[in-house]
Amino acid sequence: MKILIEIGNRPEPAWKEKFPQWNLLNEVSYAFCEALHRWEYLKDRPHPDVIFLALPEGSNLSDFEFVEDGAKDPGKFIFTFPNMQASIMMQILGFNGRVLCFNNGIKTSEFAKNECKEIAKTGKIAWLFTSPSVIEDEKRVVLFSSYPES
């Protein structure tokens, strides 16, 4: 599944009660949380044994923006780390589990897909969330896949 999330002007989100520090999130984290809110039905699916968070450039973009802004707010910086993004996603989903974060440049998404397929061969469920670095019409692309594919 694919969803496009507006990143320019971020309104106060409907999910703000689940994560009150929403305004500290970088663009990728905000987009993942907004996508999860819109994909509410994922909560009713069998919980995955593992979630893969595939970010081709890791937190490089938000790290750069943090430094460019004068590194004024360390609290904002912490939410750029992929493991923090994963934690926030679990909070929005309302469950916990294993999360693996990948960043391997342009090979990230393909590598994560292959890992998910291998896990599915063992009878386990894997979810994959990714967001490529390309922005489409001022919107962040968020992709979701479930393995085994249904």
Image (tube, grey):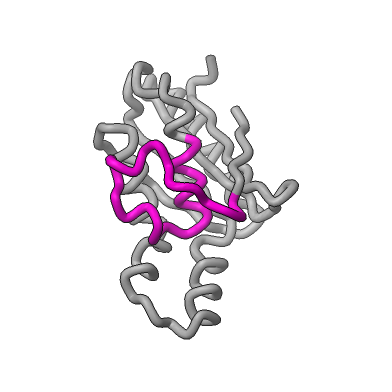
The answer to which quarter of the image holds residue 40 is top left
* Residue drawn at 62 percent across, 48 percent down: 140
Q: Residue at x 55, y 37 (%)?
A: 114
Residue 117 spot, x, y in % from top left: 51, 30
The percent coordinates of residue 111 (x first, y second) are 57, 45
Picture coordinates of residue 65 (x, y %)? 54, 73
Q: Is residue 110 visible?
A: no
Left or right placement of residue 105 versus residue 121 in this view? right
Location of the N terminus (image quadrant): top right
Q: Residue lying furthest right in this view?
A: 137
Q: Is residue 70 visible?
A: yes
Q: Residue furthest top?
A: 150
Which region is colored magenta?
Answer: 7-35
Q: Looking at the image, which is closer to me, 87 or 97? A: 87
Instruction: Choose between 40 and 48: the one closer to the eye.
Output: 40
Please identify the quarter of the rendering in which residue 37 is found: top left
31 falls in the magenta region: yes
Magenta run includes residue 44: no
Question: Relative to 62, is 32 above or below?
Answer: above
Residue 21: x and y in percent read 31, 55
Q: Give the residue at x 42% y 57%.
A: 25
At 52% from the left and 51% from the top, the residue drawn is 10
Left or right of residue 43: residue 114: right
> Dividing the picture into quarters, in which one does residue 89 lie?
top left
